[in-house]
Image: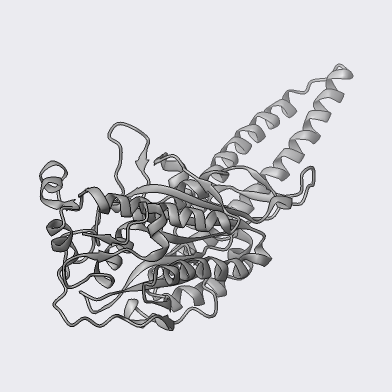
Amino acid sequence: MLDIKLIRDNPDIIRADLRKRKDEDKLQVLEDILADDAKWRESNIKADELKARRNTISKEIASIKKAGGDASKQLDQMKDINDEIQKLDEDTRYLKDSVDSKKMILPNILHESVPVGEDDQKNVELRKWGQPPEFDFDLKPHAELAEDLGIADFDRAGRVSGAGFNYLLGDLAYLDLAIINFAAEFMIGKGYTLVEPPFMLKRKPYEGVTDMGDFEDVMYKIEGEDLYLIATSEHPMAAMFQGEIMDEEKMPMKLVGFSPCFRKEIGAHGVDTKGLFRMHQFNKIEQFIFCKPEDSWKYHEELLANTEEMYQLLGIPYRVVNVCTGDIGNLAAKKYDIEAWFPRQDKYGEVASCSNCTDYQARRLGIRMGKVGGKEKTIPHTLNNTALATSRTMVAILENFQNEDGTITIPEVLRKYMGGKELIQ
C-alpha cells in the first residue's frame, strides 16, 4: 500500500507509474482517492472547528449557570453542534475507509530499472549459468520416467484427489526431502532463521500480504472458517509481525520458511502436463527478509545470489531475467525470475521469483520499525525469493540428469541427504 503523503503530494509519480504498467484503468482509483482524501481533511477541519466552538460554549454555560442565569440558548447551540459533529465523524469514518480500501488497489511504485513490456516475452535476460546438456538418446517425459521407475503414482493420486496431485514413492520422496534439507542447511549457513509457519491464514493478514483481487481465485478457502491454505510460506512469514513495531536494532531479520504450498491454478497446458511441473500441492523453501529501507536493494541482490548458488551447486543450468512491467504484479517494486533449463521443453522455465516489495507490503500489514522506547517510527522493507521449490527442482533433476538406461544420477550435493546414493534406479 502506498503512503498517503506520496499520493497527496506527488500524484503525478503514481500516474506515470500506472501508465508505465499499462494500468490506466487504475487512474480513476487514484483520482477517487485524492477526492475522498480532500473531503476527509475538510471534514476533519470542520469537526475540529466545531469542537473548539463547543468548548467555548461549554465554558459560557458554566459561567451563566454559576451566575444563576438562563443558559437554554447555549444548551440548544450545544445540541446542534453535537449533532453536526456526530454527522461529520460518520462522514470522516466513511471517507477514511473509502481511501484505505482504494489504496489497497494501487500497485507499488516501480524501480527505474524495471523494463517496460506487456508480458513475460518482454522480460530482459541478464545472464545465464551452465551449459544445457546434450543427449544422444530420446528423453522420456519426467512423469513417464518416474512411473517406469516406480517412484511416483499420478493416476491413483488423480483418482483420490484429482489432477494436480501425486504420490511420491521411494527415492522420489527421498529426493524431495533431500532438496528440502539441502536448501534449509544452506540457508541456515547463510545466517537465516528456519521457520515452519502456520499452513493456514485468516483473511485480514492475507489481505495485507498480497493482492486478494489477483490471488483469491487461486487460493483454497476452508469452508465455514475464516482461513485459507497458504500458497507460499512467504505469506505467513510476512504476516508474523502484523500490527507490531519491530526493533530496528534487530534488522535485518532474515528468515527461511519451509511449508507445503496449495494453489488451485495449475497453469497453461504444455508439454508433459502430467507430472510434477504444475501442481496444486508442492513443497517449497522460501527466503524472506525484513530490513531498513536503505538496505533493501542490497538484500534483493543477496536473495538472488543465494538461489543462484544453490542451482550452481545442484549443477542445473539456469538464467536470470529482469521481469518487465506487464509481468511483475502489484506488490513488487522490482522482481527477478530465475529460470532453470528443462530439456524436454527445450527452454528455460521459472523456478524462483525474487521480489523487493519496499514498504508496500509492510504498510498493508501495519508493521512499523523503530528504536525501543523511541518515538520516531518508519516502515520496514520486505523482500522474498524462492530458495528451492522441490517440485520443479525434481523435474529439472529428472530431465537434466536422466541416463539412457532409464536411471537418474543424483546431484552430488544431495547424496549425503539420501544415504550416499548416487543413482535412482
Find residue 112 and report its image quarter: bottom right
User: In the displayed structure, would residue 373 be above or below residue 340?
Assistant: above
Position of residue 245 measured from the top left corner of the image (x, y, whole percent): 66, 45
User: Residue lying farthest top?
Assistant: 68
Q: Report the front residue among 10 and 87.
A: 10
Rendering coords of residue 5 (x, y %): 64, 61
Is residue 43 placed above or below 298 in the rendered structure?
Answer: above
- Residue at point 45%, 57% (across, down): 183
In-front residue for pair 196/317: 317
At a point 83% along the width and 19% down the height, the residue shown is 65
**Residue 31 vs residue 119, the one in the foreground:** 119
The x and y percentages for residue 147 are: 14, 56
Judging depth in this view, the residue of 19 and 208 nearest the camera is 208
Can you give x and y, in whole percent of width and height, for residue 402 in the image?
A: 23, 70
Is residue 119 in view from this perspective?
no
Picture layout, residue 47 above or below residue 319: above
Answer with left or right where residue 53 lies relative to residue 236: right
In the current view of this chain or complex, which residue is farthest to the right? 67
Q: How is the image coloured?
A: one colour
